[in-house]
Amino acid sequence: MTAVPDRILTQHALTGQWLSLALPLADVQYGPELNGPGSLTGKLSPRLLSQNPDLIDPGTTLIYVESAGELRWGGIVWDVRTKGSDLTLEAASWSSYLQKRYDLDGNLGGRGPYTYTDRCKILRDIWAYAQTIPDGDLGVTVDATTSTSTVGTPTEPHKSLWWESRSLGDQADDLVSGDATPDYTCTVTWNPAKTAPVRRIRLGWPRLGARRRDLSFSSGVNIIEDPEVELAGDDYAQVVIALGSGDGSAKRRSINAIRNGRLRLEHVADYPDISGTDILAARAAAERTSRQNLGGIDQITIRDTPAAPFGSWQVGDDVYTRIHNAWTDYAGWRRITGWTIQPDAPGGPRATISLQPADSYQYGGVQ
């Protein structure tokens, strides 16, 4: 796959009408994200938009990147702003829509409350509720994936309470926030006739991605800039105190801690909208794991080479990464959590890839 987009397309979210089949967007950057919507940014001539105001209507215009005849990214235009002779456009993919929607009926229109219920099912219910309301159907399909990760107990069912006014997006984020929870990412493809986009939420259990022994990221091969390595003791903690809903002594609390031979450092994470103890515990565990990564390689920038051709990796994949420079000598598996492609970057297309430590337990202990 070439990284240079053949064209940018825009479409009305409700009618499906094509607004532009070749939007002249410059300085394009786009890419997906693990457990998030991913993003797209670009610049457009303000004169073009003033002459054709129906090309882009933030909040109801869909935008797509097509390359080599295939749709590579799709999302919703959320922000258009002008300054001088520049017009900047920002978009995010399908799950960003849930941040603008709320449960007005309670328990997702009667689909809940939930007891020992698969998180994947609740994610599907969230989307089903959002898209059955008039003018709320994005045409997004959610995978039929099932998992053994559940929420809710007979004494404490998982509920969606209308008076808490939590966005459907925040509720969905809670379901994928822990170490042993499903993964998702947003995708788009053409239908078989290549006449309409197929908008999809890909679910993965126990996780998305695979260990890619056929790919590698290496200094001097495809990594083109020395990555920043941050050693921040202020951000480190091996004890996380997660606070949920409630007041005073009734406030929900979950503590996740380990001893690892280092000076004890604690961090308080506040989640005032979370009332479920299982979800709060998952958040505490995820935050503690994240805060123990001291000096990791979190981002690299690469060129398109045979070592890892653009389009060959997926969200969630583990790729062996080697960094060698004056400050760093690192080699190990890193998990791809997202990326942005810059098709018209100086010197040729480049990809900036976000990474996190790979979870080797998902591969039966293989290192």
Image (cartoon, helix red, strand yellow):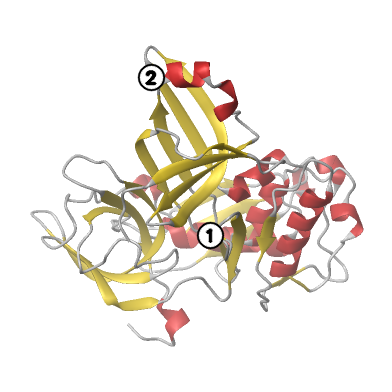
What type is the residue that disc 1 sits on?
Thr
| Quadrant position of residue 173 | bottom right
Residue at 54% x, 29% y: name it: 79
Q: Position of residue 303 (x, y in %)?
A: 21, 55
Residue designated by label 2 = 86
Determine crowd level at label 2: few under 14, some 14-19, many 20+ residues with C-alpha closer than 10 A. few
Q: Position of residue 105 (x, y in %)?
A: 90, 46
Residue designated by label 1 = 189
Q: Disc 2 on helix, strand or loop?
A: strand
Residue at 45% x, 55% y: name it: 72
| Quadrant position of residue 42 | top left
| Depth order, front residue of 13/252 | 13
Q: Determine whether label 2 and label 1 are within 8 Å by CB.
A: no
Q: Report the side of 248 relative to 237 (left or right).
A: right
Q: Report the side of 309 relative to 122 (left or right).
A: left
What type is the residue that disc 2 sits on?
Asp
- Above or below residue 221? Residue 80 is above
Residue at 70% x, 67% y: name it: 119
Q: Position of residue 111 (x, y in %)?
A: 87, 61
Q: Disc 1 on helix, strand or loop?
A: strand
